[in-house]
Amino acid sequence: MKILVPVKRVVDYNVKVRVKADQSGVELANVKMSINPFDEIAIEEAVRLKEAGTATEVVAVSCGVAQCQETLRTAMAIGADRGILVQSDAELQPLAVAKLLKALVEKEAPQLVVLGKQAIDDDSNQTGQMLAALLGWPQATFASKVEVGAGSVKVTREIDGGLETLELPLPAVVTTDLRLNEPRYATLPNIMKAKKKPLETVEPGGLGVDVSPRLTTLKVVEPAGRSAGVLVADVAQLVDKLKNEAKVI
Ligand code: AMP
C-alpha cells in the first residue's frame, strides 16, 4: 500500500508572528520556517504503518516555494521514501492545493492520503476535506487512532462528546489530530540519508492545475490586547460584578 502525505512549510510554532506594517499579511522575512506540526504527525503515522509492514511506500508532497525542499527533507529524515515538490511562488490557497494533490493522486495512485487536520499558519482546516470531495473518496478527519485492515481503514476521531470510530473503504483520506502519535526526532544519520533520497520537482501547469487565488485578503491585523484583570474581595463581589458589570449571569 502506498501512502501519500502532504506536508506544508509554515512559520515555526515557537515564532511570535508579526503583522506586516502595510497589513497585507505576516512577516516572513528571516523567520524560522518548519514542517507543519500536524503533517509531522501524519508522516510519523505513515512511517509506522510502513515499519509494521502495512505500507510499502511513503511519499511526501509539498506545494510552494523552492525552500519547501527542506520540509520534504525533514519528512524524509523521519522516514518518507521520496518527495515531490510542486513548485510555485504563487499564494496557494486550500482549494488550489487540493486540486494539485488530486492530480498527484491520479498519477501516483496511493491507497491512503494522510494530511494534517490543519496548517498552523492559515488554520483553514479545509485541504483534506476538499481533496476527499474532489476525488469522491471517503474521509475521516481529526484521527487519534488509525488501523489499516484488508481493504479498509478504521479511524478513531476526537469529537465533542468523546471518541467516534469510523470504518472507511480504501482508498481514503485521513487527517491527523494531535494525539495520534508523538513524532520521533530525526537522527543525524537519518538526516544525512534523507539528503540522498529522490526528490522530484513538478509545476502546477505540468499537472494541468490553475492555482489562481479565489479569495482576496483584505487586511491582516493583530488581535486586540487583553485588558488587565481585577482582584475581587469575596464571592459576593464576584457574583455582583458578573451580574451587573459583565452581565453574563
Ligand atoms: P489547511 O487546510 O490549510 O489547514 O491544511 C490542512 C492540511 O493540508 C495540512 O496539514 C497539510 O497536510 C495539507 N496542506 C495544506 N497546504 C499545503 C501545501 N502548500 N503543501 C502541502 N500540503 C499542504
Image (cartoon, rainbow, N blue to C red):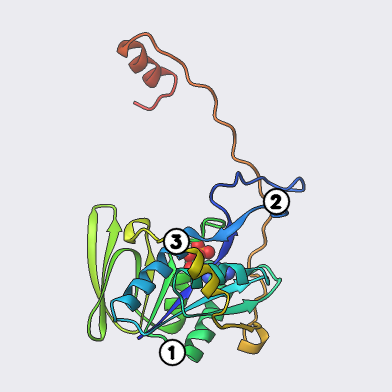
> Would you place residue 232 above or below residue 182 in this image?
above
Residue 109: mark in rendering: 1
Identity, as a three-letter code, of the amino acid under mark 1:
Ala
Task: Please tell me whether mark 2 sits on a helix, a strand or a loop.
Answer: loop
Residue 65 is situated, as x and y percent measured from the top left of the image, at 67, 70
Residue 38: mark in rendering: 3
Quadrant where the N terminus is found in the figure: bottom left
Q: Is residue 168 left or right of residue 223?
A: left
Q: Is residue 126 visible?
A: no
Front one among 83 and 11 = 83
Residue 10 is situated, as x and y percent measured from the top left of the image, at 58, 59
Residue 221 is situated, as x and y percent measured from the top left of the image, at 65, 44
Name the image quarter holding residue 33: bottom right
Task: Please tell me whether mark 3 sits on a helix, a strand or a loop.
Answer: helix
Residue 99: mark in rendering: none
Identity, as a three-letter code, of the amino acid under mark 2:
Glu
Quadrant where the C terminus is found in the figure: top left
Name the image quarter holding residue 88: bottom right
Mark 3: C-beta under 8 Å from nearest atom of ligand 1: yes
Q: Earlier in the sequence, mark 3 or mark 1?
A: 3
Residue depicted at x 37% and y 56% = 178
Residue 27: mark in rendering: 2
Most distant residue in the front direction: 189
Q: CA distance from mark 2 to mark 3?
A: 22 Å
Q: CA distance from mark 3 to mark 1?
A: 23 Å
Q: CA distance from mark 2 to mark 1?
A: 37 Å
Front one among 55 and 128 = 55
Q: Earlier in the sequence, mark 2 or mark 3?
A: 2
Residue depicted at x 53% and y 22% = 228
